[in-house]
Amino acid sequence: MTTVRLENIRKVYSNGFEAVHNLDLVINEGEFVVLVGPSGCGKTTVLRMVAGLEEISSGKLIFGDRLMNSIAPRDRDIAMVFQNYALYPHMTVEENIGFALKLRKVPKEETRNRVREAASILALDAWLERKPSQLSGGQRQRVAMGRAMVREPSVFLMDEPLSNLDAKLRVQMRAEVSRIQRRLGVATLYVTHDQTEAMTMGDRVAVLEGGRLQQCDVPQALYDRPANSFVAAFIGSPSMNLYEAQMSEDGLSLKLGSQRVTLPGVVFERHPALVGFRGRPVIVGIRPEHLHIPRAEGEPFFAGDIDLIEALGSELLVHFSIDAKSVHAGKVEEEPDALAMVSGEGIARTGPKVKIATGSRVEIGVDAEELQFFDPDGGASIWA
Amino acid sequence: MASPVIRSEDERTEPLLEPLTGAKKRIRIAPGRAVIFAVLAVVSVIIMYPFYFMAVTSMRSEAQYQLGRGFSLSSWTQLFASVPVAREMMNSLLVCTVAIAIILTLSTTAGFALAKAHFRGHGLVLLGLVGGMMIPVQSIIIPEYVNFVGLHLINSYLGAILVYVAVGTPFATFLMTTYFRGVPEELVDAGRCDGLGYAGVFRRIALPIAKPALATVIVLQFIPIWNDLLVGLLFLQEPTVRTFTVGLGVLASSRVVSIPGLMAGSLLSTIPAAAVYVIFQRFLVSGLTLGASR
Amino acid sequence: MSSASAVIVAETVAEVRSRRLSLDRDRSRTGVMLVIPAVATVTAFLFIPIGEAIYYSMTNWNGITSQWIGPSAYLAMFKNPLFWRVLENNAILLLAVPVTLVCGVTLAALLNERVRGWRIFRAAIIIPTAVSWVVLGIVGIQAFAQNGMLNSMLGSVGLKFLEHNWLGSPLSALIAVAITFVYSLVGVNTLIFVTGMATIDPSVYEAAKLDGASWWQGFTRITIPLLRRYFMFTFVITAISAFSALFSLIFTMTSGGPNYGTTTIEFFIYDQAFATGAFGTGALLGVVLLVILASVSLLQLRLMNRGE
Ligand SMILES: Nc1ncnc2c1ncn2[C@@H]1O[C@H](COP(=O)(O)OP(=O)(O)O)[C@@H](O)[C@H]1O
Ligand SMILES: [Mg+2]
């Protein structure tokens, strides 16, 4: 049982590129921490530094009370699951899973039992004699898990282990990986670019962008109180609507493009610091489920042009546009579709029975209590 | 462009020469498949004719050969009487085996280092070795010969072996480097996480999965070494250390043995190379096309 | 701003360098250990001899003693008509290269049709590759003799006027060498082209067929262009073989004669050094051969890179 601490860790690649900036992160004993962020943000780099596969440029990596910076990977007692599984093609499933034990000179009999046990947990019993090339993607993924499991390591590292599976299997394996991790109670750092995976699996989620840690907290806190506009946009699907807006001098309304949206007093109760932004530009954020069509009586609203309606059965996703400038914080490159380019687009989530026509202009109600605000300078969220 | 031509072991079931989709799928307006068959048949007969000639002639005595009729084993007995066939075959086998074993050792270790265990200046080393591929044996044979006279390596197996190794290692290393480059980095990482150092990764992971590449090196080196005359002629002059090919070459130029006897020897010399060739055919192609596909 | 960040980067790179020591040490140390045996062997028995060859090429070395001549040794060689005679032989032999390629690609296209028994035909076409040049030389003498296979074949197809004692005169002996060369190498060429053709997506042909292309058009407009790299590659290996693989064949079949008619540069090296004892001249010719081969290889690299 080990606590993993990353203190002020930096990674500068030999070409001078600084991939990770001063990262602080703690993974407590038995905790499942998910490191999430868009591709290229440095997740793999962090994981490889923890594994010892990549040199740490500066800062400290501590397991328990041991400084690990210059310990070779084989002496770190870590187990890693790779995105492409990295199964040894010349070994059977049984040999793959037992390889690390064999290298550690664990007695044959014990190795055998531990491999069998892991295999039965993973429902691989029938495939032990097969070579990896004779397995399906899902089976290979489970062998990779098994290889990490039998080790009973002090730290688990997983780099997008589910991203090569098809959608259905991925959802299934999410639960299975979580279950196994709970059962082993090993400190786990799990990397993914999929925020849904992060939210559903992590005890805590660390959001990384451009090599910098944006926020690390329990999933609900990331959703409810994102530390900045990047986290706000990255966590949640469909993502939060973010617009540039201007607060009136008296603080009673918000200028959203050519429209004026009234701000009830509750907004300032929840965001006292917003007082300082009177008469200044702010970024306003609202999640799709906090926009109402049709609007409720007495709530603030704005009018939007309906571009597209996606009927998902249980709900509708209503795409609209307004003439305010929308803010893309990080997600733009993730989903480069044509709609995202239209300025002032947004999404509202409504019940399935609502009648709206594409091309019409409707009034969209705003749940003022759920409004979020960010400083246009740097994107930090505005609370107290 | 194309993936490394040498496939990893688990893909071995797929023969290299097969097209990716089945033959049935290719729909083409062919100029009469019977014509194609006929052309291929005629070409094959012409190509195989010398083998038929060798076989038939070797089964005749000198007189029968002149006459063009009759069969006997006399030229075979004559061959075995005038040439230490078994000895020369053993010499050939020894020289080939040892030379190839050394080439395999040098090329797998260096290939792994150049592909996966980078060190300062590895690029230069690779460049140097690739440059060495261009050096033909004829360009070094004279200084090598003189050096080896000084080292008393003439008429010793070691001398010839070292020449074969020197000339064969650069290409074999290039081939192994290319192969190991195709091994995913994650496999190395997985091995290191599981408890191996780089040397262990080489021995326990890289080497076992390189079997197809090893086979390619074997076939690409065996045939030229088995069939070599020049190096053997200079470095293995004594009849006791001579390889079979050299023996045959000397026999042919000395003209002491009849034509049927020479044919018997020719046939005998062709069998091992052809056998290696047929068995390893797939790997020959993969090695040969290495240069074409990338 | 930018200069400030440049300073930071410079610092961090230096920092990275100094830290290299700990974790990457296993890798670089293992790498060096593993590469040393190959580098040492190749240096001792390939690079040093080629250096010696370059040095001795400018001397009158006889294997024991040598006197420095200098680069003028090359000039003297370039003035030697025999040298040009030999290069001319090489040039003529080079003409066999395109012949080999055309035969190879044609046979590959035919094999690619997968007619009944194509595997047997493939094996038959490839098998000469395994046969040593010594054997080919021995059989070649019989094949090109006055009463040999070639003449009897010519006679039986009504080309009796072409009958000839092939090895008896310089040019025809060289042609005989060239024919043997094609015979030996056509199989490898075919094999490489078959592999190349297997990489072509059959749907390309189907699309062409829908556009109304004939078999021949498919061959010339799709197969040939898509095999560009394979053509360059086979050209280079076949050309290199023409320069440096024929010693044994010439030694057994013609001994370079008649009258230097089949002496190529590689045979000339042997002839000069070990028949005449002019080791310096042999070394010089070896350097010339290396330069030729290096030029061919570099040309290939240029062409291949340009094609990207
Ligand atoms: N060996 C390397 N040298 C230089 N830059 C690298 C190296 N490896 C990764 N990078 C860069 O570091 C950044 C982070 O990479 P990575 O950690 O793989 O991202 P992620 O796993 O989040 O997609 C990327 O911009 C990548 O281009
Ligand atoms: Mg990654």
Image: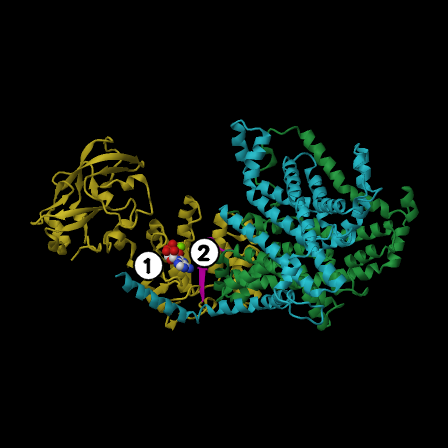
What amino acid type should be assigned to the residue bearing mark 2?
Phe
Colour displayed for chain A in the image of the structure: yellow
- Residue A101 lies, in percent from the top left, at 52, 64
- The chain displayed green equals B
- Residue B226 lies, in percent from the top left, at 73, 57
Q: Residue B231 carries which label?
A: none
Chain containing mark 1 = A
Left or right, C70 with respect to A144, comes to: right
In this view, the residue in front, C162 or B237, is: C162
For the residue carrying disc 1, how many other residues have a C-alpha within 10 Å: few (<14), some (14-19), or many (20+)? many
Mark 2 highlights which residue?
A82
- Residue range in magenta is A77-87
Quadrant of image for the C terminus of chain A: bottom left
Instruction: Name the residue at the top extreme.
Output: C212
User: Can you say whether B156 is above or below A287 in the image?
Assistant: below
In this view, the residue in front, A188 or B82, is: B82
Mark 1 highlights which residue?
A211
- Residue C162 lies, in percent from the top left, at 78, 37
Display colour scheme: by chain
Residue B61 in view here = no
Residue found at x 35% / y 68%: A58
Q: Based on the picture, tell me whether residue A296 belongs to the magenta stretch.
A: no
- Residue A305 lies, in percent from the top left, at 21, 35
- The chain displayed cyan equals C
Residue A142 in view here = yes
Query: For numbered disc 1, what is the local secondary structure?
Result: loop
